[in-house]
Amino acid sequence: MPRILLKTAFLLTCGITPLHAQQAADAVDPEMASDTSAFDTLSDAAQAALAAKNAGTPTSAENWMVAAANPLAVEAGAAVLREGGTAADAMIAVQAVLGLVEPQSSGLGGGAFLVWYDANSGAVTTLDGRETAPLAVTPRLFQTAEGEPMGFWDAVVGGRSVGTPGTPMLMEEAHKRWGRADWAGLFGPAISLAEDGFTVSERMASSIAGGAERLQTFTRTAEYFFPGGEALQAGDTLVNDDYANTLRLIAAHGSDAFYTGPIADDIVATVRTAAGNPGVLSAMDLAIYKVIERAPVCVPYRAHEVCGMGPPSSGALTVGQILGMLDRYDLAAMGPESAEAWRLIGDASRLAFADRGRYMADSDYVPMPTEGLTDAAYLDSRAALLEGDMALSEVAPGAPEWDHAQLWADDVSLELASTSHISIVDQYGNALSMTTTIENGFGSRLMVRGFLLNNELTDFSFRTHRDGVPIANRIEPGKRPRSSMSPTIVLKDGAPDLVIGSPGGSRIIGYVAKSIIAHLDWRMDVQQAVSLPHLVNRFGTYDLEEGTDAAALEGPLTEMGFKVNLRGLTSGLHVIKVGETLKGGADPRREGIALGE
């Protein structure tokens, strides 16, 4: 139960509409743009970083830098780096605080993908901490008695949508491989904030108000976010003793304290007894969970290597395909205000998303043409489709080279926008890019011991087949759902040049690709690249960020044959440029900062 110490009168509301098709579902954005008025107690350095972001200029540092979605979390990571910790150490402190201060986006009950550059070896390693489907799932998990897909919200709210969390084990695995600091001490800042209380930000309050009805489905969750029956408001001070106690157990006993014993028992009981929509997660699912090291996916672009997370993430493949198709076109000469440049970017994205829908899923369960999708000759053949001067009238998946035969039907899975991203460079030259999530805003709405459980299973396709042909991203026991998370490290001559990523559902891919193009082609600094208005096209409709200069392209893109939609596009990009000095950019659409020394 939270203790309310101070209340203000600020409250925003936002409606969320249930939708069934991915295009429509992605239009629902549970993440809110926000101001940063809740952070008036930050250190002078953090205040300066916030001022730099508000002024549209990057922050600079000589030795280390951390960029993340909440200043309190950034300060926790900075303290670790200041004391000689590595980027892996700092990530643990950042994630522990994020799970407290922005519970709608990520936390212990979710999963994450991590990309690591090791300064000693020069190697890029990717770790898969994605949630897994329980062993007891069946193909009919998200279908009605008639075999039709369930309504999205009918599937999300409750235990049915909960996958086995991966974030706690990923934190521990990163520390075992690359940490220097004492494990237990890394949880100190989050424990102190949970016990002493933190100020509820405008963004957190807005998210609570926007999801009020579903957040009050379950008693424990309702009591936390609606103490005394009233929604938390910006400026309230919130205490979470249960979360502090959970962190203490993990600090003392490692991730085993999460995957076995009382915490695991409570997770399973909460999922399996969720009123109206119980799930099938078991103690065995938690006990056998493993973080998996995957081969990174790297694609050349403008004399750089763009490296990220491979399957079950579609992020690196789809970002890589977009950039690979564009590499033959002179975007630099066109410039960021050119409708022709955005025609190329938009249709390259549509072609990549067509491949994504057909081929991409957990490669441990379905064969995937991973190498074929990023083969230079294949991308050249797809790029040739862009050579006209009008929008493509239609797009279809390509035919990449396979080392075996397989036929898949196009996917129909949903993916909403709640997620968070962390970028860190330490004094030793290591770089970390990690995107972390509980899927939809506030996940399944089930709360256990101070943290929320994910609804990650709804990232699977609700249909298993189309016209008798199997869908690659269908649900199966132990399988990891496809993701669009795109934690990325861009290399130049084998060393980090950019560390980047964002939340935003399947639009993450467009946000990351746009920012890389803005920096490498249009020579924008990282803050300019992050702040550049968004134009995102995945399935034919070109989303233009409302209230920005992107609106000037509505007419030209429409004349080219695109259907155009002006709407809010609330990314959360956090970028670090690595060079003689470090330069950090934090998304002005969110409350995060980039901080370094």
Image (tube, rainbow, N blue to C red):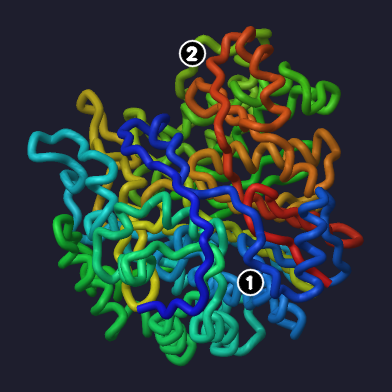
Q: Give the Cα separation between the discs numbered 2 and 1.
A: 46 Å
Residue 429 can be seen in this image: no
Q: Position of residue 254 (x, y in %)?
A: 45, 85
| Residue in the image at 63% along x and 7% along y | 559
| Residue in the image at 35% along x and 38% along y | 17
Q: Earlier in the sequence, mark 2 or mark 1?
A: 1
**Rendered view: 353 above or below 43:** above
Three-letter code for the amino acid on which mark 2 is drawn: Glu
**Rendered view: 578 above or below 529:** below
**Rendered view: 56 above or below 83:** above
Residue 13 can be seen in this image: yes
Q: Residue furthest front?
A: 9
Q: Where is the N terminus found, in terms of image quarters?
A: bottom left
Q: Residue furthest bottom?
A: 252
**Rendered view: 82 above or below 438:** below
Q: How many residues crowd mark 2 within 10 Å: few (<14), some (14–19), many (20+)?
A: few
Which of the two residues, 365 or 424, is positioned nearer the viewer here? Answer: 424
Q: Which dot, 2 or 1, sits closer to the camera?
A: 1
Q: Position of residue 209 (x, y in %)?
A: 42, 54
Residue 592 is left or right of residue 371, and the answer is: right
Q: Position of residue 31 (x, y in %)?
A: 50, 49
Is disc 2 in contact with disc 1, using a CB cutoff of under 8 Å? Answer: no
Q: Residue furthest right?
A: 580
Residue 8 is left or right of residue 493, and the answer is: left
Q: Residue tagged by mark 2?
A: 394
| Residue in the image at 49% along x and 86% along y | 195
| Residue in the image at 28% along x and 71% along y | 220
Q: Which mark is residue 433?
A: none
Residue 78 is left or right of residue 476, and the answer is: right
Three-letter code for the amino acid on which mark 1 is drawn: Leu
Q: Position of residue 292 (x, y in %)?
A: 46, 64
Q: Residue tagged by mark 1?
A: 72
